[in-house]
Amino acid sequence: MDNLEMLALPNSHARRHNSRGISLIIVLIMMIIIGITTATAMRSATSEQRATNNLRVESMALQYAEAALRYCENQMKKSSADRPYSLQTAQIGSPTTFGPTTSGWEDPATWTGSSGRKSATRTTVPDSVIQDTVDTVLPNKKPECVVENMTGYGVVITARGYSPDYHADGSGVTDRGAVVWLQSITN
């Protein structure tokens, strides 16, 4: 029996050694699966966070544009002498035909002042109006509006609001952040 026990010992020891090796491989495979799952979950959470931030930034730009539109609409209800200089009747000008080559609000130069076509009615909304309306920090670029007298339509008020992270290149093309445009027509 001693000989049989001696023969059985190495064989059972080899089985235990092999099962330890298989356990190690299984644990390593499980660790890889857990790592991949964790990385996927983190990437998904990051994407969702970016999307949520984009919605928040766009919402803020919308609030700033609404504040600008309401400000200019309220100013246009006042007598010409009580409005800011840029919104007085003398600055609004004679009626123009509505269209892409004649209406100022569609021309980027109206907003940037490039090419010599800066609108005489381009008005930046005062900080106090923004803080009263939006109740938040001031954006880097203040909301603004342009008022135009359009034949057949009346007075067209166009407002632009910018997100806090807004940035544009030298030609006025947005390269970061959000811009929201709102428009109203009054008689």
Image (cartoon, grey):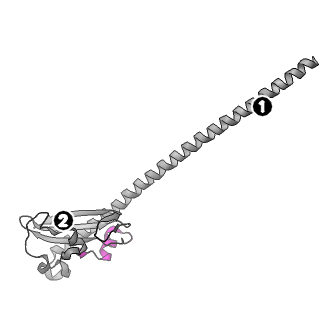
Is 46 placed left or right of 156 in the picture? Answer: right
Residue 131 magenta-drawn?
yes
Of tags 1 and 2, which is closer to the observer? 1
N-term mark: 1 or 2: 1
Is residue 118 visible from the viewing direction of this image? no
Q: Point out the residue furthest to the left here.
A: 152
Specify whether 166 is left or right of 23.
left
| Position of 90 relative to 156 (above/below) | below
The quarter of the displayed image where residue 90 is located: bottom left
Tell me the residue at 36%/69% (across/down): 135
Residue extent of the magenta highlight = 123-138
Find residue 166 and report its horizontal and vertical position in percent. Answer: 35, 67
The image shows residue 185 at horizontal and vertical percentages of 14, 64
Rendered location of residue 1, percent (x, y):
93, 16
- Give neighbour class at mark 1: few <14, some 14-19, many 20+ (Cα, 10 Å): few
Give the residue pinned by disc 2: 106
Q: Amino acid at mark 2?
A: Glu
Q: Residue furthest top?
A: 1
Q: Residue 172 lies in magenta, yes or no? A: no
Residue placed under numbered mark 1 in the picture: 17
Instruction: Write the residue at 33% across / 60% down.
Output: 59
Q: Can you tell which quarter of the image residue 132 is in? A: bottom left
Residue 112 location in percent, x, y? 25, 73
Classify residue 107 as left or right of residue 187.
right
> Quick check: 123 above or below 65?
below
Disc 1 to disc 2, C-alpha distance? 78 Å
